[in-house]
Image: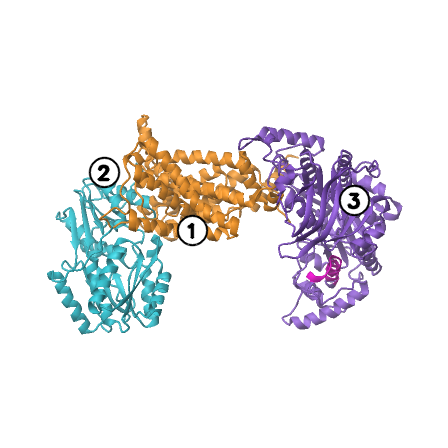
Chain colours: A cyan, B purple, C orange
């Protein structure tokens, strides 16, 4: 065992929340950052400090979680589907520690699995894109070609088709390595090429790579759609909307419920109905999203919530 | 390499010539006092004191590794001495870099020219001393000054032609002009005739005499004793880092100098029993070789090499000898013609170097360090280069290290390689000992044909003698030997039959007994005589 | 003027790397101080994290195993004069081979599965190196360029297979199912435990022993066989190689295939030893770290093992550092690792000349003092 103990550690029995971020890092202005914001909010409201770790290689996932568990963490939130196998292993080793995993399912008695119906917000964004498009062509830039991103893409496509069955949707993935989540230059290039082919709205689901997509849209006077966090403020007036995924709420809720003893293991799925996903409308995009558009989106939203409208979900093969 | 110091710039332009040699005060042009230089524990220069007078040609001779180059590098500022003083015109100067040497009026012509090939003579001369932003005006002035210098010293060169298009002899003149343009009063020439034809060498000596009569001090670094006798006024002999003798040239002799240089008496001229050639071992017919750019380097070359004879291939460096050797050894694919080794055709059959070695063709390459040895390897590892997959060195894929080492020790003993240390890096051996090891390696393969390129390049006199005797002994043992050398003396001493190459062709052939240096020189220079006899 | 003067062996192999490491750590300490943490505490955390506990040592050697394989891969190609930047991709494809065997025959006996997986890993890595080698040998395509491109191709290939073919059904993460019990590389703490030695649990596994065996094998191959001899000739002096009748094409293909096969060893450690499934980007940059490891280890197996352990320690200690000093985030750890790579690897010779001068000076001072 290590001979030194960090000052941040508390005596056993205290409530100690912890969070492990994935490759993208907590400043990706997107998925991980949203998670970080939830943790920060919890800290601000309760005054309880939390431990965090950003991994740099695959083996560290397991190492970091075991380390945190050993040092008395009460609840560990693992952000991102890539952590699933590590959570599975470590949760078995530390049955008294609570684990919450975001974007994946781990079926263990001490693991809570939080998933989102991204297809629902993507559907609304697809509709928005098709409504705003004058050319009848819209684009999608994904990070890596993985099931989660296909889920976004499929929802987007369906939403766009609902508005305009003849809509043309360009789709590009940024890369085949995790670097694809952090390459704004490439994101800008892909967006430019889609704009060049006639698209006038591009939706990104590519983490920090999406920042490049949004910059390109701004530079060319076109529209972009943000992802995960509300990114409307990043390029006000050129971001049509954002497919918001409230990872922050998931993290915040996990910490808070654990502290209050209300945390329960098992699957949790958050969609429009649970306000886990949404499209974003605020002062930064009111100039590009007309009231009529918002009305159409809200109508679809209530149809989805009521179950009148079913959005297909991408299934892994 | 070119001076770029401020003082040099001014000197380049104060063209209103101060009479040469009159600058500064009294004292000899160059005086060295107690120069010491040590590398690790080895003295490269020890207590060197010498005086070079104005208006003289001063020879500096010594074997390889005697310390000549180190001394001249100290004078020209490439290296700094551990102790000692340098005086120019009687005044002590500190020379920490070539710029300082140039400022002190010292110029150097290196064995490998330091010219920008795409620049003209004028541009090369002003390089580093351009002065001012207005290059054009400077160039015009430089051209006038260079033309004046060229006239004064008999250094005619085309000033406006890119250096790349000039012959080696002309390039050397550009180097000398460059030094004079920088107002050198002391001119160091390092082995200047190594790359010249006999005719060009004679012309160079004329220029040196002009320089001497104009009051310049010339230091001629060479290992060719005949040149020393022909041109110098005084000669300093170095051995093992120290000066072992200083002579007035006309009061000494070649024999005396050689003895001083080597520290022992030299054997007489090479003794050879008369040639008794046997059957043809290597037959070359109508060979044409192109280089990587497709330029024809060897054309219409045909000759036979018979058992028990040494054929010498003479020629100025760069006239196709290298490519011819490469093609014979299987390293270059000829574009035309045939080569037969012991009656077996090699070109069309695409027989490579490895198979040719197996068929009895050994090759001592011209460029020893570039090709013949691997610099980072030990002597023992180098002693199997090209033979490393012979069964006696291997057991399956493994090398038999003990056998390799043992055989290397044997080779070293037989061929007098010193030190007899098989584990020592090859680069720690002198050029002569490296060459002896290469020769030992190639001879041990029991070849029937031996190709030898520049057998004694960078080899000291003692080793030269040894190598020459070995080659003659091999000839007498019935090997067919082709010796390629740019040293005419070597060819005349060794060969039974002499071929001369110029512009990629064999332009002359003569038996040893009938060869005259004058005729060979003309052929080498490309002046066609009666051709092949 | 050539720098013919060489350092004594003890200085070249012992002192010089230590000086490099010291300077790198001093610079890193400066970075830490700027961030407002005590460099002393940071270094203590780093070293203690890497070598101060059984678990730390286990992780350090587990990372080192990857770096030994990739470092050897780089070195073998380098000895033949080839700069193989594609070790990352070769490890990726080699690991794919390892993983496919493990998925297919994971239920069989380990003594059957593990050798088969080794073979598959070596073949996969070798195949991925063979193609660029062939392109260089026959078409003259520069191997640096092609191997870089093959890294991307490997990545695209494995990602495609994971997302579309191999993915465990009904799961988000592009990962395969877990390997069967026969395809698990025994962990070191289990092996030691069976031998009665208690050791803390870590992913350190017997692939480490395989890596050490590979290092010995590489030494024999390079310095004791005629093939290694031919490769070294070609690497040191290509003209001399042609002179000696060594066919460049055979050198290129032979050395690259061995290089790629060694890279394939990474999959044994990473997949069979730790992850027990194929997942995206499992080489995690070890192929590139291998370049630094080979540089620092002077392309000699012994040096590579030492450098790999050092880099393993940096990885493990660095994780510990960012764990305990939140102000030193993972990017700072990368900066510190980068400094060590830069000074010890890329600039490994900057202190050569000063050290030489200093040794001369000392030598002279001592001589003048004694006589």
Question: Helix or strand or loop: what does disc 2 sit on?
Answer: helix
Left or right: B111, with B21 as reference point: left
**Which residue is pictured at 46% across the width and 45% down the height?**
C130
> Is most of the magenta stretch helix, strand or loop?
helix
Chain label for disc 3: B
Q: For marks 3 and 2, give the CA distance.
A: 85 Å
Question: Helix or strand or loop: what does disc 3 sit on?
Answer: helix
Q: Give the x, y percent position of residue C338.
A: 42, 49
Q: Would residue B458 be seen by someone viewing this image from the given angle?
A: no
Dot 1, crowdedness within 10 Å: few (<14), some or many (≥20)? many
Residue at the disc numbered 2: A93
**Which residue is pictured at 18% across the width and 55% down the height?**
A45
First to last magenta residue range: B163-180
**Which residue is pictured at 46% across the width and 36% down the height?**
C215
Residue at the disc numbered 3: B490
Give the answer, above or below, for where B291 lies relative to A111: below
Q: For marks 1 and 2, give the CA distance.
A: 39 Å
Chain label for disc 1: C
Give the answer, above or below, for where A226 lies relative to C314: below
Give the answer, above or below, for where B184 lies relative to B303: below
Q: Nearer the viewer, residue A223 or C44?
A: A223
As drawn, the residue found furthest toward the top would be C196
Q: Are marks 1 and 2 on the same chain?
A: no
Q: Nearer the viewer, mark 3 or mark 2?
A: 3
Screen quadrant of the N terminus of chain A: top left
Left or right: B236, with A254 as reference point: right
Chain label for disc 2: A
Question: Helix or strand or loop: what does disc 1 sit on?
Answer: helix
Q: Nearer the viewer, residue B283 or B369?
A: B283
């Amino acid at each position: 065992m290590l001979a030194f103990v960090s000052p941040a550690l508390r005596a056993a029995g205290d409530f100690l929340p912890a969070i492990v971020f994935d490759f993208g890092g907590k400043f990706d202005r997107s998925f991980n950052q949203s998670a970080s914001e939830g943790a920060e909010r919890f800290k601000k409201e309760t005054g309880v400090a939390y431990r965090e770790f950003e991994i740099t290689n695959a083996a560290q996932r397991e190492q970091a979680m075991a380390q945190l568990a050993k040092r008395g963490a009460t609840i560990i939130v693992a952000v991102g589907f890539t952590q699933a196998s590590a959570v599975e292993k470590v949760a078995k080793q530390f049955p008294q520690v609570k684990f919450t995993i975001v974007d994946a399912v781990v079926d263990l008695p001490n693991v809570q699995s939080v998933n989102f119906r991204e297809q629902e917000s993507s559907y609304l964004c697809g509709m928005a894109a098709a409504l705003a498009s004058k050319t009848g062509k819209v684009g999608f830039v994904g990070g890596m070609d993985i099931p989660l991103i296909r889920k976004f893409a499929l929802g987007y496509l369906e939403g766009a088709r609902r508005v305009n069955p003849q809509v043309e949707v360009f789709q590009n993935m940024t890369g085949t390595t995790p670097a694809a989540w952090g390459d704004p230059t490439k994101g800008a290039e892909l967006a430019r090429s889609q704009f060049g082919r006639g698209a006038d709205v591009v939706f990104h689901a590519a983490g920090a790579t999406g920042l490049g997509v949004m910059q390109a849209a701004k530079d060319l006077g076109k529209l972009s759609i943000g992802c995960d966090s509300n990114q409307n403020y990043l390029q006000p007036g050129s971001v049509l909307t954002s497919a918001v995924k409230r990872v922050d709420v998931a993290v915040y809720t996990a910490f808070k419920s654990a502290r209050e003893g209300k945390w329960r293991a098992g699957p949790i799925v958050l969609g429009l109905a649970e306000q886990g996903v949404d499209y974003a409308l605020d002062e930064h995009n009111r100039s590009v999203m007309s009231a009529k558009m918002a009305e159409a989106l809200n109508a679809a939203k209530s149809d989805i919530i009521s179950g009148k409208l079913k959005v297909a979900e991408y299934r892994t093969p | 390499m070119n001076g770029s110091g401020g003082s040099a710039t001014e000197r380049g332009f104060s063209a209103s010539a101060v009479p040469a040699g009159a600058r500064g005060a009294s004292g000899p042009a160059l005086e060295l006092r107690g120069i010491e230089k040590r590398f690790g524990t080895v003295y490269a220069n020890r207590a060197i004191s010498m005086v070079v007078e104005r208006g003289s040609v001063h020879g500096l001779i010594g074997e390889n590794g005697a310390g000549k180059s180190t001394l001249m590098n100290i004078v020209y500022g490439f290296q700094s001495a551990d102790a000692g003083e340098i005086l120019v015109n009687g005044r002590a100067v500190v020379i920490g870099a070539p710029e300082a040497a140039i400022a002190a009026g010292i110029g150097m012509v290196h064995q490998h020219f330091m010219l920008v090939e795409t620049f003209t003579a004028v541009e090369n001369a002003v390089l580093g001393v351009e002065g001012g932003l207005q290059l054009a005006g400077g160039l015009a002035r430089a051209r006038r000054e260079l033309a004046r210098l060229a006239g004064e010293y008999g250094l005619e060169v085309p000033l406006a032609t890119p250096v790349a298009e000039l012959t080696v002899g002309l390039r050397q003149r550009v180097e000398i002009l460059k030094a004079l343009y920088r107002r050198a009063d002391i001119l160091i020439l390092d082995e200047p005739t190594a790359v010249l034809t006999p005719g060009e060498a004679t012309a160079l000596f004329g220029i040196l005499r002009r320089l001497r009569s104009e009051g310049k001090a010339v230091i001629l670094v060479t290992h060719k004793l005949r040149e020393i006798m022909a041109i110098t006024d005084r000669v300093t002999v170095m051995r093992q880092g120290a000066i072992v003798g200083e002579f007035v040239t006309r009061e000494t002799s070649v024999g005396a100098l050689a003895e001083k240089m080597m520290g022992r008496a030299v054997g007489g001229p090479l003794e050879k029993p008369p040639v008794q050639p046997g059957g043809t071992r290597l037959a070359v017919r109508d060979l044409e070789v192109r280089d990587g750019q497709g330029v024809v380097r060897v054309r219409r070359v045909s000759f036979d090499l018979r058992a028990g004879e040494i054929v010498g291939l003479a020629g100025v460096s760069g006239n196709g000898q290298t490519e011819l050797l490469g093609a014979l050894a299987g390293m270059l694919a000829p574009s035309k013609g045939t080569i037969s080794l012991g009656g077996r055709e090699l070109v069309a059959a695409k027989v490579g170097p490895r198979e040719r070695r197996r068929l009895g063709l050994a090759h001592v390459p011209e460029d020893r360090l570039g090709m013949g040895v691997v610099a980072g390897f030990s002597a023992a590892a180098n002693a199997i280069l090209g033979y490393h997959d012979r069964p006696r060195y291997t057991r399956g894929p493994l090398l038999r290290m003990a056998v390799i080492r043992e055989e290397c020790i044997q080779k070293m003993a037989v061929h007098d390689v010193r030190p007899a240390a098989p584990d020592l890096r090859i680069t720690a051996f002198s050029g002569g000992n490296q060459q002896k090891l290469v020769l030992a390696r190639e001879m041990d393969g029991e070849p029937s044909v031996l190709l030898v390129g520049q057998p004694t390049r960078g080899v000291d006199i003692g080793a030269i003698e040894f190598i020459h005797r070995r080659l003659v002994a091999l000839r007498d043992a019935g090997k067919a030997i082709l010796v390629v050398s740019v040293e005419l003396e070597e060819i005349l001493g060794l060969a039974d039959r002499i071929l001369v190459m110029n512009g990629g062709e064999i332009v002359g052939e003569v038996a040893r007994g009938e060869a005259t240096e004058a005729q060979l020189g003309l052929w080498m220079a490309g002046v066609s005589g009666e051709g092949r006899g | 003027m050539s720098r013919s003067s060489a350092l004594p062996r003890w200085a070249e192999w012992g002192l010089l790397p230590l000086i490099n490491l010291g300077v790198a750590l001093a610079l890193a300490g400066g970075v830490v101080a700027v961030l407002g943490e005590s460099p002393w505490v940071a270094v203590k955390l780093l070293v203690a994290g890497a070598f101060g506990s059984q678990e730390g040592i286990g992780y350090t050697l587990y990372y080192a195993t990857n770096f030994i394989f990739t470092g050897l891969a780089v070195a073998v190609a380098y000895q033949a004069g080839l700069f193989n930047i594609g070790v990352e991709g070769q490890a990726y494809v080699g690991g794919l081979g390892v993983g496919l065997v493990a998925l297919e025959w994971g239920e069989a006996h380990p003594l059957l599965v593990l050798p088969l997986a080794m073979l598959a890993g070596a073949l996969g890595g070798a195949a991925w190196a063979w193609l660029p080698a062939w392109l260089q040998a026959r078409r003259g395509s520069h191997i640096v360029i092609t191997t870089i491109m093959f890294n991307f191709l490997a990545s695209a290939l494995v990602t495609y297979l994971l997302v579309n073919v191999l993915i465990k059904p009904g799961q988000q993460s592009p990962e395969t199912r877990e390997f069967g019990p026969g395809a698990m590389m025994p962990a070191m703490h289990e092996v030691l435990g069976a031998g009665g030695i208690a050791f803390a649990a870590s992913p350190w596994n017997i692939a480490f022993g395989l890596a050490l065996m590979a290092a010995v094998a590489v030494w024999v191959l390079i310095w004791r066989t005629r093939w290694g001899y031919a490769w070294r000739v070609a690497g040191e002096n290509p003209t001399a190689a042609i002179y000696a009748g060594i066919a460049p094409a055979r050198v290129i293909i032979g050395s690259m295939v061995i290089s790629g096969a060694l890279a394939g060893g990474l999959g044994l450690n990473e997949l069979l030893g730790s992850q027990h499934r194929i997942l995206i980007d499992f080489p995690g940059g070890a192929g590139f770290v291998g370049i630094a490891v080979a540089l620092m280890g002077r392309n000699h197996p012994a040096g590579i093992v030492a450098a790999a352990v050092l880099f393993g320690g940096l990885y493990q200690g660095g994780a510990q550092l960012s764990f305990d000093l939140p102000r030193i985030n993972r990017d700072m750890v990368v900066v510190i690792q980068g400094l060590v790579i830069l000074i010890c690897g890329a600039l490994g010779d900057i202190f050569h000349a000063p050290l030489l001068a200093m040794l001369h000076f000392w030598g002279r001072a001592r001589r003048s003092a004694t006589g």
